[in-house]
Amino acid sequence: MRFTQLFGRTLRERRADVESASHELLERACYVRQHAAGIYTYLTLGLKSLRRIEAIIRDEMNAAGAQEILMSMVHDADVWKRTGRYDSIDATLVRFKDRRGHDCVLGMTHEEIVASLAATELRSYRDVDVVVYQIQTKFRDEARSRGGLLRTREFLMKDAYSLHLTTDGLAKTYGDQASAYARIFRRLGLGDAAMVESSTGLMGGKQAHEFMCFLDVGEDTVAVCRSCGYAANIDVIGDAQNCTRCGASLEWKRGVEIGNIFQLGTRYTDALGVAVTDAHGTRRSVIMGSYGIGVSRLLACLVERFHDDRGIALTAATTAIDAHVLVLGRRDESLQTLASSLECESRERGIELLWDDRTDLSAGERLTDADLLGATIRVTLGRDTLADGTVELRERRSGRVHTVSADGAVDALFRLRKDILIGESSVC
């Protein structure tokens, strides 16, 4: 991919109204553009990063035995009325009538839809202990969006749902999903995300936990025990100072919720008449679990965690660009030919490469943009390339520099990116 073909442009100015580092950097680096309050368009680079986040989520969800499906964003309001949430949720739930005058809602979550699917797809105890998930756009008309992607009205979410005949089956899947979440966040670079006890809220059920990324920009307040590690949202623990498990003092931290898991019980299935026969032929209510991850919010959290005063510095697993090629110094046809060759060979090797082929900007301006966009490796062609046939590879996050031969640049780039991935995964 070439910079002159990239849709959108980097921004030099720092916006005065931004509330977080991720809000500023994602806009300036041409990852996102705000369309309206809490509603964003993901440009090429933002979407590439999102897709890498999604790939890690899919990999771990599939490994945990979940099956991917895709449900409608528009729901018949009848199922929401039957569960009672149509009337109990405030204006956050968008309600409208279709041209036939029928009540509909925009999906903010999909418990009702999964329960109605279960009513047609499940017959007996042999059909349960199943998990389905999707990665899909949701809409919640939040009273106040803030922080760029940290709190939006339209957002991308991974939501999963499990269906069981016994509480033991639910408990096992609840634990399996918690473990899968821990692996997902570790692979993304957020291995210190904490699982904290939380309120069941509008979802209902008997137990819930949130996964918190501790950041100063977080809206949630979490109590963490200094001794046993127990953690809970302030909604659960109140103003206690009573670790409720060991009695040690609590530390209060700010956090951003990046995932949640709920043991829902039979609230939705009872309301929608979902039951199956057990091994003895008796009809029994299906028990549900619900498990969510804020995919677009994860992008914001990753930028909050991984940036410096020069720009975005995401992990190699989540960055939009693996390599950023710059040709510096006097314009030379042989350097342009080499850059074009690197572009083609990198594509064949599965390396996401951006070649800054702009000729109307100074070297300093292009170097500034390279740091802002945050490719894992910056590849520089210039005077040394002409003099002795070498190319400079500079790691964005560590700043380490590697000088390699131009002939073996793609091989060296491929190996270096792999080494960085392995190194980051061992740390995370």
Image (cartoon, rainbow, N blue to C red):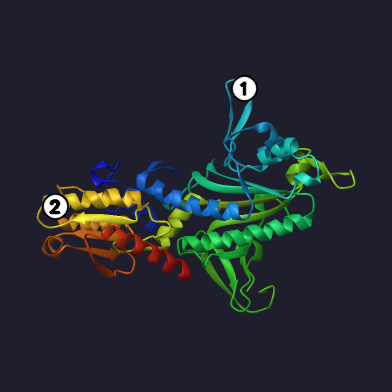
Residue drawn at (27%, 65%) of the image = 394
Query: Is 18 situated left or right of 363 in this image?
Result: right
Q: Secondary structure at mark 2?
A: helix
Residue type, label 1: Gly
Q: Residues within 10 Å of mark 2 (few under 14, many from 20)?
A: few
Compared across the picture, whether 65 is left or right of 20 comes to right
Residue 292 visible at all: yes
| Mark 2 touches mark 1? (CB < 8 Å) | no
Residue 27 can be seen in this image = no
Q: Residue at x 47, y 53 (%)?
A: 53
Front-most of residues 75 and 393 = 393
Residue 131, relative to residue 302: is it above or below?
A: above
Residue denoted by label 2: 334
Give left or right: position of 112 versus 378: right
Instruction: Tell me the residue at 57%/21% (across/down).
Output: 99
Cα separation, mark 2 vs mark 1, equals 67 Å
**Local crowd size for mark 1, using a 10 Å CA cut-off: few (<14), some (14–19), many (≥20):** few
Q: How many marks?
A: 2
Q: Position of residue 12 (x, y in %)?
A: 24, 52
Name the secondary structure under disc 1. Answer: loop
Nearest the viewer among 353 and 241 is 353
Disc assigned to residue 101: 1
Q: Position of residue 15 (x, y in %)?
A: 31, 52
Image quadrant assignment for residue 327: bottom left
Residue 96 left/right relative to 187 = right
Dot label at residue 307: none
Q: Nearer the viewer, residue 293 or 76?
A: 293
